[in-house]
Image: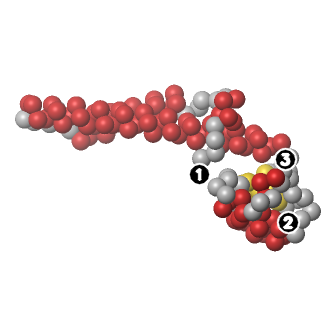
Amino acid sequence: MEKVEKIQVMARSSPSDKLLTVQCLKQKGQVIAVTGDGINDAPALKEADIGLSMGIQGTEVAKESSDIIILDDNFASVAIVLWWGKCIYTNIQNFIQFLLTVNVAALCINFIAAMSAGEIPLTTVQLLWGNLYMNTFAALSLVPERPTKELMAKPPIS
């Protein structure tokens, strides 16, 4: 536990050493990513928060134990994967925030209008069509945002 945070890279180590390192770092509250391509990497890949296996040289056991398979076996692809993954996550967050805002506003307006006028101003079908219309344009405008360099400065999300 004392030495585990000083380790930068582990190579050519035993499966038990890899697994022990992952478990110790997780106990210290770290977010752990492990790359591997062989059967001996499977326990650490499964235990890690994010397991990355190689798609070309990797064994089936490693691929099944991992969360992400790097198809081109290029380690530089990991940064690109993380960059795009954070971008997609942020875009989904923006889309959900927009949907919640619009739908709560529509619900409040409909409720207030129904309470003051005594009848419901919009039928269920009208609300559904309006929702479909708003959601379509929200998805087209919010989801395709490109990743920015600031995304990589954000801490990982559990």
Residue assigned mark 2: 38
Horizontally, residue 48 falls left or right of residue 127, namely: right
Horizontally, residue 141 falls left or right of residue 20, namely: left
Is 39 drawn above or below residue 73 in the view shown?
Answer: below
The disc labelled 1 sits on which kind of residue?
Answer: Ser
Mark pair 3, 2: CA separation? 15 Å
> What residue appears at the point 60 percent right and 39 percent down from the top-left corner?
88
Position of residue 56 measured from the top left corner of the image (x, y, whole percent): 86, 56
Residue at disc 3, secondary structure? loop
Label located before the other in sequence (3 or 2): 2
Horizontally, residue 98 falls left or right of residue 30, namely: left
The disc labelled 3 sits on which kind of residue?
Answer: Phe
Residue assigned mark 3: 75
> Within 10 angstroms of label 1, few (less than 14), some, or many (20 or more) residues?
few
The disc label shown at residue 158, or none: 1
Residue at disc 1, secondary structure? loop
> What residue appears at the point 87 percent right and 57 percent down from the top-left corner?
10
Label located before the other in sequence (2 or 1): 2
Horizontally, residue 148 falls left or right of residue 9, namely: left
Mark pair 2, 1: CA separation? 26 Å
> Within 10 angstroms of label 2, few (less than 14), some, or many (20 or more) residues?
some
